[in-house]
């Protein structure tokens, strides 16, 4: 196999600072004068997305419906409380009238009048038991059964 040659760098002719210098081009250039650009009228294009507009309108409508719903619920609760108070006052009045009614009659007097008319006490009444058999209800055909009967009649 051939042996690789040994790499040697040339150092004998090079001295630091002997390389070519880069020219400073900025030093030789004159500053450019630029004229102001004429600004042309650019019309503004407004692009409206119909889906977004419909969504915003729907959101506003739903917000108004919710606000009206809150007002309606508050009114309904006020009406509920008023009705509840009215029912409680009716219950109190009913219990007072019931007590007045019960105190207005003498039970012994009512019993004596009933016996005078020929009525008898429940304990002395004869009782009898009657057994009744309830007939079974007729089976009504459903729509499905009617359709099956019709199709079976066609194919027979």
Image: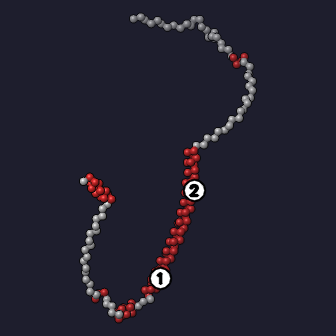
| Of the two numbered discs 1 and 2 in the rendering, the one whose residue sits closer to the viewer | 2
User: Where, quadrant-wise, is the N terminus in this rendering?
Assistant: top left
Residue where numbered disc 2 is placed: 64
Residue where numbered disc 1 is placed: 96
The color scheme shown is secondary structure
Residue at the location (25% across, 80% down)?
129
Q: Are marks 1 and 2 in contact (CB under 8 Å)?
A: no
Residue at the location (44% across, 86% down)?
101
Residue sitting nearer the eye, 102 or 141: 141
Toward which corner of the image does residue 47 lie, by quadrant?
Answer: top right
Q: Picture coordinates of residue 117 (x, y %)?
A: 35, 93
Residue at the location (45% across, 83% down)?
98
Q: Picture coordinates of residue 51 (x, y %)?
A: 55, 45
Q: Is residue 95 visible?
A: yes
Toward which corner of the image does residue 48 lie, by quadrant?
Answer: top right
Marks 1 and 2, how far apart at CA: 48 Å
Q: Is residue 108 visible?
A: no
Q: Which mark is residue 106?
A: none
Q: Seen in the image, is 40 located left or right of residue 91?
A: right
Q: Picture coordinates of residue 24 (x, y %)?
A: 68, 16
Vertical arrangement, residue 67 with respect to residue 120, above or below: above
Q: Which residue appears farthest toward the bottom when viewing the image?
A: 116
């Amino acid at each position: 196999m051939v042996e690789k040659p040994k790499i040697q760098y040339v150092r004998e002719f090079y001295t630091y600072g002997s390389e070519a210098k880069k020219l400073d081009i900025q030093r030789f250039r004159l500053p450019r004068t630029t004229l102001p650009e004429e600004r042309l009228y650019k019309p503004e294009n407004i692009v409206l997305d119909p889906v977004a507009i419909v969504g915003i309108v729907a959101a506003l409508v739903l917000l108004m419906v919710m606000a009206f719903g809150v007002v309606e619920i508050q009114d309904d609760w006020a009406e509920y409380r008023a009705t509840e108070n009215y029912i409680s006052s009716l219950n109190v009045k009913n219990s007072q009238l019931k007590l007045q009614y019960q105190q207005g009659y003498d039970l012994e007097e009512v019993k004596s009048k009933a016996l005078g008319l020929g009525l008898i006490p429940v304990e002395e009444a004869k009782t009898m038991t009657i057994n009744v058999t309830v007939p079974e209800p007729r089976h009504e055909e459903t729509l499905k059964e009617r359709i099956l009967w019709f199709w079976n009649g066609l194919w027979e």
